[in-house]
Image (cartoon, rainbow, N blue to C red):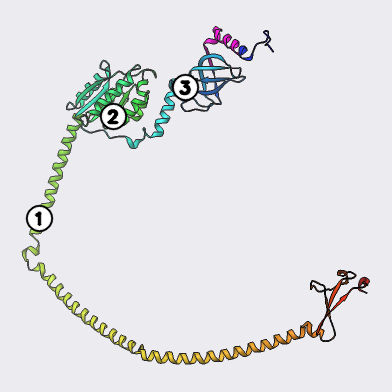
C-alpha cells in the first residue's frame, strides 16, 4: 500500500520543527538564568541536567568540550547564567537547551571560582600553619618577583637598603596582570628555585587593584609553586584589605611592599644598638663571674685543709678502719648463719631418709588394703541384699504369678494384647495364654456392656 502524500512522517515533522528553531533569530543565541536541577556530575562525559525557576523547567545539555572550559564546579541548586541555543532532539521529538557557557549568578564567576579553589586547597593542607617556614634573621640575598616598571621594586629596594644595606636584592621581572601573568610568575619562581640555596627569602607582590587585576595571584599554578618553594616566601599583593590565595599560602603576608621589605630585613641601627647592649651585658656578666671565681679562690687559699693536707685523709682513714671492722663482723655473722642453716638441713635430711619413708608408705599400704577389703565386703553384701529385694518385687508383680492363679490374657494374630471388646470383630482369631501353654479361639459373638455394666 502506497504512502499517502498528505501525511508527514514523524521524522519529517521533527526535522521541520528543528529547522524552525535553527532559523529563528531569537533562538539562535539565548541567554538564560535559573537554578540547576537534577545535576549529576559525569566524569569525562557530556552533562545532562535541568534549568528551572519558580514556574517552569527546561532540559539542558552541555557537551564535554564546553563543560571542560568552566572555571568553577556546578552544584545542585546553584543559580547560574547560561548561554546557548534551542534545538529539537529528533529521536524523542523533544526540544531542549544546548548550553555553551555557564557562570554562577550572584557574586559572579570569579568569586565562585575563588571560593571553590580556596576550599579545595585548604582541604589539601596548603594553608596550614605547620607548613610555614621561618624568615631568616640576616638574609644575604633576596629575590623579588614583581613588575620591573612598577613602584613595588622601588619601595622594596629603598626600604631594604635603608634598613640592611648588606642584603643583595635581585629582581625577577614578571607580569602581574593579564592572562599571561600567572605563567610568568610561575616561571620566575621556578628560576629562583633552580638556584638552590642562593637566596634566603623571596618577596612576591604588586600594588592594589580589583579582583580581576589581582587574579593571577589566585591561580592554582601560582599557589602550588609558592607552596613548593624551598625558601620562605613573603607575599605583598594588593593593599591591606585585599586577600589572595598567594597571601594564604605564603610563609608571611605583608600589607605593602615596604612592610614586606621590613619583614625580610632587620633594622641595622637596631641591630647595632642591640649588639652594643649585648656587649655591655656580656662584659658585666664576665666581670661578675671573675669576681665570684676570685672569691672562691680566696676561700680555698685560706682553707685549713690546704694549710694542713694530712687532714684531708684523716677522716677517710678512720672511715676505712670502721668499714673494715664492720666487714669482719659481717663475715662472722654470715658464717654463723651458714653453719646454723647447715645443721638444720642435716636434721631435715635425716627426717627425709628413704628407709623411713619406705616404712611409712608400707604401713599406709597395709592400712589402705585392709580398709579396701572391708569396704568391698560391705559393698557386696549391700548389693546382694538389694538384688534379693528386687527379685522379690519382680516376683510379686509378675504376670506369670497372676496366671498361675487361673487367669489368662488374650492377644490377636499380630501379638497385640486385647484389652477391650471394642477392638474385636466376629470370626476374628485370638490366642488365650495360660501358664502352661496357649489356646487359639474364634470369636462367634460380641456382647458389649453399656457404661461398664
Residue 258 in percent (x, y) is at: 27, 23
Whichever of callouts 3 and 1 sits on the residue coming sooner in the sequence is 3
Q: Which residue is label 1 attached to? A: 297
Q: Is residue 202 left or right of residue 242?
A: left
Residue 312 figure quarter? bottom left
Q: Which mark's residue is nearer the viewer, 2 or 3? A: 3
Q: Is residue 15 magenta?
A: yes
Residue drawn where x is 10% and y is 59% of the image: 300
Q: Nearer the viewer, residue 149 or 172?
A: 172
Residue drawn where x is 41% and y is 28% of the image: 118
Residue 355 in percent (x, y) is at: 36, 91
Q: Which residue is label 3 attached to? A: 64
Q: Which residue is label 2 attached to? A: 233
Element assignment for label 1: helix
Magenta stretch, residue numbers: 14-32
Residue 27 in percent (x, y) is at: 55, 10
Amino acid at each position: 500500500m502506497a504512502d499517502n502524500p498528505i501525511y508527514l512522517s514523524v521524522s519529517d515533522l521533527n526535522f521541520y520543527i528543528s529547522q524552525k528553531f535553527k532559523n529563528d533569530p531569537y533562538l539562535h543565541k539565548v541567554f538564560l538564568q535559573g537554578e540547576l536541577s537534577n545535576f549529576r556530575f559525569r566524569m569525562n562525559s557530556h552533562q545532562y541536567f535541568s534549568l528551572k525557576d519558580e514556574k517552569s523547567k527546561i532540559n539542558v545539555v552541555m557537551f564535554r568540550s564546553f563543560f571542560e572550559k568552566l572555571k568553577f564546579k556546578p552544584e545542585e541548586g546553584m543559580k547560574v547564567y547560561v548561554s546557548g541555543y534551542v534545538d529539537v532532539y529528533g529521536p524523542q521529538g523533544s526540544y531542549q537547551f544546548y548550553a555553551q557557557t555557564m557562570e554562577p549568578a550572584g557574586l559572579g564567576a570569579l568569586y565562585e571560582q575563588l571560593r571553590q579553589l580556596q576550599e579545595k586547597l585548604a582541604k589539601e593542607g596548603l594553608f596550614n600553619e605547620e607548613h610555614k617556614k621561618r624568615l631568616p634573621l640576616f638574609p644575604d640575598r633576596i629575590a623579588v618577583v614583581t613588575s620591573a616598571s612598577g613602584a613595588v621594586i622601588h619601595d622594596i629596594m629603598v626600604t631594604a637598603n635603608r634598613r640592611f644595606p648588606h642584603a643583595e636584592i635581585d629582581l625577577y621581572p614578571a607580569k602581574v596582570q593579564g592572562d599571561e601573568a600567572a605563567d610568568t610568575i610561575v616561571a620566575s619562581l621556578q628560576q629562583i628555585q633552580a638556584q638552590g640555596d642562593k637566596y634566603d627569602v623571596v618577596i612576591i607582590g604588586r600594588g592594589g587593584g580589583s579582583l580581576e587585576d589581582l587574579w593571577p595571584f589566585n591561580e592554582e599554578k601560582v599557589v602550588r609553586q609558592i607552596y613548593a618553594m624551598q625558601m620562605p616566601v613573603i607575599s605583598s599583593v594588593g593593599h591591606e584589605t585585599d586577600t589572595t590565595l598567594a597571601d594564604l599560602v605564603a610563609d608571611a603576608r605583608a600589607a605593602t611592599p615596604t612592610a614586606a621589605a621590613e619583614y625580610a630585613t632587620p633594622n641595622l641601627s637596631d641591630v647595632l644598638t642591640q649588639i652594643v647592649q649585648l656587649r655591655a651585658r656580656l662584659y658585666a656578666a664576665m666581670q661578675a663571674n671573675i669576681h665570684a671565681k676570685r672569691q672562691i679562690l680566696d676561700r680555698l687559699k685560706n682553707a685549713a685543709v690546704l694549710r694542713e693536707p694530712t687532714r684531708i685523709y684523716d677522716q677517710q682513714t678512720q672511715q676505712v678502719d670502721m668499714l673494715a671492722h664492720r666487714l669482719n663482723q659481717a663475715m662472722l655473722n654470715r658464717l654463723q648463719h651458714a653453719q646454723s642453716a647447715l645443721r638444720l638441713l642435716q636434721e631435715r635430711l635425716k627426717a627425709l631418709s628413704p628407709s623411713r619413708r619406705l616404712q611409712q608408705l608400707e604401713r599406709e599400704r597395709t592400712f589402705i588394703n585392709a580398709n579396701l577389703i572391708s569396704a568391698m565386703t560391705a559393698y557386696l553384701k549391700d548389693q546382694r541384699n538389694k538384688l534379693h529385694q528386687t527379685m522379690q518385687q519382680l516376683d510379686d508383680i509378675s504376670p506369670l504369678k497372676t496366671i498361675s492363679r487361673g487367669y489368662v490374657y488374650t492377644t490377636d494374630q499380630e501379638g497385640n494384647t486385647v484389652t477391650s471388646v471394642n477392638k474385636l470383630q466376629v470370626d476374628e482369631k485370638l490366642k488365650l495364654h495360660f501358664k502352661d501353654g496357649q489356646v487359639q479361639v474364634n470369636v462367634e459373638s460380641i456382647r458389649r456392656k453399656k457404661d461398664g455394666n
